[in-house]
Amino acid sequence: MDAVTPAAPSLEVSGLAFAYPDGHQALFGVDFRIGRGERVALLGPNGAGKTTLVLHLNGILTGGAGTVTVAGLPVGKRHMAEIRRRVGIVFQDPDDQLFMPTVREDVAFGPAAAGMKGAELEERVRIALEQVGMEAFADRPPHHLSFGQRRRVAVATVLAMEPEILVLDEPSSNLDPASRRELADILRSLDVTVLMVTHDLPYALELCPRSLVLSDGVIVADGGTGDLLSDDELMRTHRLELPFGFDPRSVTMGA
């Protein structure tokens, strides 16, 4: 074989352990890697450590053991600005991310803060809004939009930074069925690595070919989403509940 260096994975977590100042240990040595362009769901019961893990991905939490590497860059003080550009986190409540008078200004905020201006900034905003189907709403105040539209704009604020990996915290929560489907279509169309933290197991199955199960601060399973959701013992042991009547074995996975 040729000695070609493969592109660094979008995300590599190795031996990550973390305890809060009160002594509560949330992570006990987490290991996984996500390749470029993968869509992966992070599943687990409440209290498993999912939020703690996500907050390590862009350096909001630091100081534990182990390493987190994003596209070959170690997460740490030296590369923090670049890491925060590369790891785009979309929080569960879009109102945590939207605070400017118009949609356009919200989406422009990150790139403008990074020094972008003029026609280049306008084009970056236009592309990000187009990616989420919200270009027609650029001049609207965010608080005049529906919840589903605000979530799409929150995704655009992150896409405007051209991230390496898009981390979504419960992206389907509080969405009506149409908004849920529209967001799924958008996420499938993006040429970006996706890590989706969710309790919505059918949504994970629909969008993510691969899933990680985090339980009591460790990864207890890593495999095909359909295979994991069909493993009754795994599901029962780690308090993962499918909706009543939903059979993952009966779902034909799309592309």
Image (cartoon, rainbow, N blue to C red):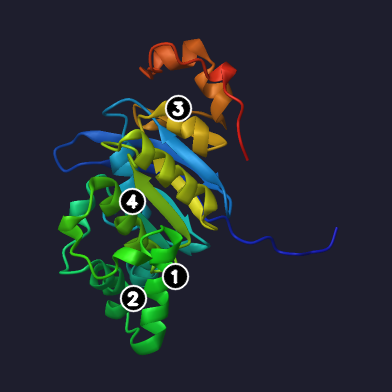
Residue at the image point whose x is 33% and y is 51% from the top: 56
Q: Quadrant of residue 121?
A: bottom left
Marker disc for residue 127: 1
The answer for how far apart the CA atoms under marks 2 and 3 are is 34 Å
* Precedes in sequence: disc 1 or disc 4: 4
Q: Does the CB distance between marks 3 and 4 fall below 8 Å? A: no
- For this rendering, which residue is in front, 104 or 13? 104
The answer for how far apart the CA atoms under marks 1 and 4 are is 29 Å
Three-letter residue code for mark 4: His
Marker disc for residue 202: 3
Three-letter residue code for mark 2: Pro
Drawn side of residue 100 relative to residue 72, left or right: left
Residue at the image point whose x is 41% and y is 58% from the top: 133
Q: Quadrant of residue 140?
A: bottom left
Point out the residue furthest to the front here: 136
Three-letter residue code for mark 1: Ile
Which residue matches tag 2?
A: 111
Q: Secondary structure at mark 1?
A: helix
